[in-house]
């Protein structure tokens, strides 16, 4: 039983780079560095050599080969050389009858580690390499000690034939496999974050292009009319005035979008929903007028404070209001209404329209990425908005009836 206890203790030491990695990098948006590997491996080597498996007659067995192999594999040869230096100094300091043997063994195991690590990166089945490493790191000390101290080997045969190989094979296999798995998960997570950022930028760019295209088309039409010279001076001046107005509007749209789509920072602050909504309604009013839609907002004097990111909040309000306007732009007496309700420490913002509405199938697909029923739609507005609302601990519910209208209720906790 002493063997199992020793193996478990040495495995615990050997697995500490994996454990420390998972604790240290859990919330960081970066992956491991060579410096991290060097620091954790140096620490593990010291601990493992300080509390070895067996110290009979100066013969010390620990997880040194496991840790050095791992250090070279993930930290490179430079990390391996520093660990080798640390090992030699500490082993000389500990001393004992087998000090010289330990150094001779390292002269063989260290180059073997470098060779196996370079093979590990080249071949597909890494498990074979970890197994070969475990056996190699047990066989080399066995042969060396058998040549120089046969009495010791014969007296501790089961320890050298069973405990050491199991400890080395299991240690290397577990550490390398578990660490690799964590690193891959982290890479996947980092890629996912990157994609989300790109998506948010795409969404803003796509809706911006959509907004700017309308005034540009108007100006282009008027310029063509002016060049045809078939209108009197008064009419031509009117065309120029409208064109100038449209260009101003484009400028306004661009600056509003710039303020809305400032880089998404991870800031959560107290914001007044009423004043943010007022700004967004001002931005969206020309769009509503152009589409013959009446935009009505409940006027509130007192602020409603919530926690969130102001630019994300503005962006999501734009998305909902724009959708509502687009839903009713072809119906008679088109109207979009925005109202508030305070209920159980939450504010409920209701955005309703009397537009085309949605059937059950459309409702079930709402918020899915790229889902759009519009010829110029991106299908990203609601995906982004739902995500932003979730990040503010909010919820969205929707009621809709085909041909009679839709009502979105956004519920957010009060600050
Ligand atoms: P996009 O506006 O680019 O199409 P969104 O994600 O903003 O993308 O909306 C996705 C789809 O949800 C729209 O294409 C539309 O079919 C539907 N939708 C969203 N809001 C409304 C609404 N108020 N009334 C009717 N349909 C809506
Ligand atoms: Mg939209």
Image (cartoon, rainbow, N blue to C red):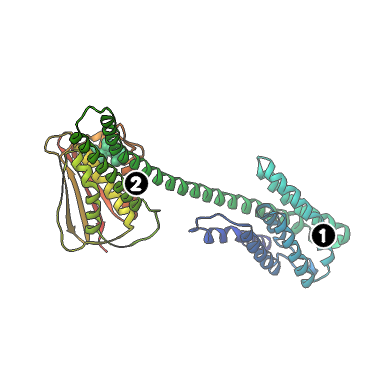
Quarter of the image for residue 46 reads bottom right
Q: Which mark is residue 36?
A: none
Ligand 1 appears in which quadrant?
top left
Residue under pointer 2:
384
Query: Ligand 1 closer than 8 Å to the CB at disc 2?
Result: yes
Label 2 environment density (alpha carbons within 10 Å; few <14, some 14–19, many ≥20)? many
Q: Position of residue 238 (x, y in %)?
A: 20, 38
Q: Residue at x 66, y 55 (%)?
A: 75
> Which of the marked residues, 1 or 2, is nearer the chain's N terminus?
1
Q: Residues within 10 Å of mark 1 (few under 14, many from 20)?
A: some
The kind of secondary structure element at disc 2 is helix
Q: Considering only vertical position in the picture, is 195 above or below 28?
A: above
Report whether residue 103 is seen.
Answer: yes
Res. 153 mark: 1
**Viewer-nearest residue: 82 or 179:** 82
**Label 1 SS:** helix
Visible residue check, residue 366: no
Q: Quadrant of the N terminus?
A: bottom right
- Residue 280 position, x and y percent, is 25, 51
């Amino acid at each position: 039983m002493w063997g199992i206890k020793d193996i478990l203790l040495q495995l615990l030491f050997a697995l500490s780079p994996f454990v420390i990695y998972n604790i240290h990098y859990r919330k960081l948006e970066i992956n491991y560095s060579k410096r991290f590997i060097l620091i954790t491996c140096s620490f593990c080597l010291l601990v493992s050599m300080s509390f070895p498996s067996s110290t009979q007659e100066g013969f010390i067995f620990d997880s040194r080969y496991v840790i050095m192999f791992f250090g070279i594999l993930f930290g490179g040869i430079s990390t391996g050389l520093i660990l080798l230096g640390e090992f030699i100094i500490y082993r000389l300091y500990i001393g004992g009858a087998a000090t010289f043997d330990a150094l001779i063994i390292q002269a063989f195991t260290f180059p073997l580690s470098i060779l196996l690590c370079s093979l590990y990166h080249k071949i597909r089945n890494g498990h074979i390499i970890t197994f070969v490493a475990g056996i190699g790191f047990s066989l080399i000390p066995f042969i060396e000690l058998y040549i120089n101290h046969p009495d010791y080997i014969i007296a501790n045969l089961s320890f050298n034939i069973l405990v050491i190989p199991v400890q080395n094979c299991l240690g290397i296999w577990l550490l390398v496999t578990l660490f690799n798995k964590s690193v891959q998960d982290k890479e996947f997570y980092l890629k996912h974050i990157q994609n989300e950022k790109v998506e948010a930028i795409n969404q803003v760019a796509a809706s911006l292009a959509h907004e700017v295209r309308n005034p540009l088309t108007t100006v282009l039409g008027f310029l063509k009319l002016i060049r045809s010279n078939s209108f009197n001076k008064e009419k031509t001046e009117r065309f120029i005035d409208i064109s100038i107005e449209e260009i101003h509007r484009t400028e306004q749209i661009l600056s509003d979008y710039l303020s809305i789509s400032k880089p998404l920072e991870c800031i959560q602050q107290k914001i007044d929903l009423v004043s943010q909504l007022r700004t967004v309604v001002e931005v969206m009013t020309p769009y509503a007028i152009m589409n013959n839609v009446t935009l009505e907002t409940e006027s509130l004097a007192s602020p409603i404070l919530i926690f969130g990111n102001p630019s994300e909040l503005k962006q999501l309000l734009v998305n909902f209001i724009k959708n509502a306007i687009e839903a009713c732009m072809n119906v008679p007496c088109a109207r979009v209404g925005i109202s508030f309700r305070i209920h159980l420490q939450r504010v409920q913002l209701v955005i309703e329209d009397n537009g085309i509405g949605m059937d059950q199938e459309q409702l079930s697909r709402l918020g899915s990425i790229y889902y759009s029923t519009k010829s110029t739609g991106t299908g990203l507005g609601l995906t982004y908005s739902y995500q932003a609302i979730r990040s503010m601990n909010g919820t969205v519910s929707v009621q809709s009836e085909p041909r009679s209208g839709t009502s979105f209720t956004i519920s957010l906790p009060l600050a």
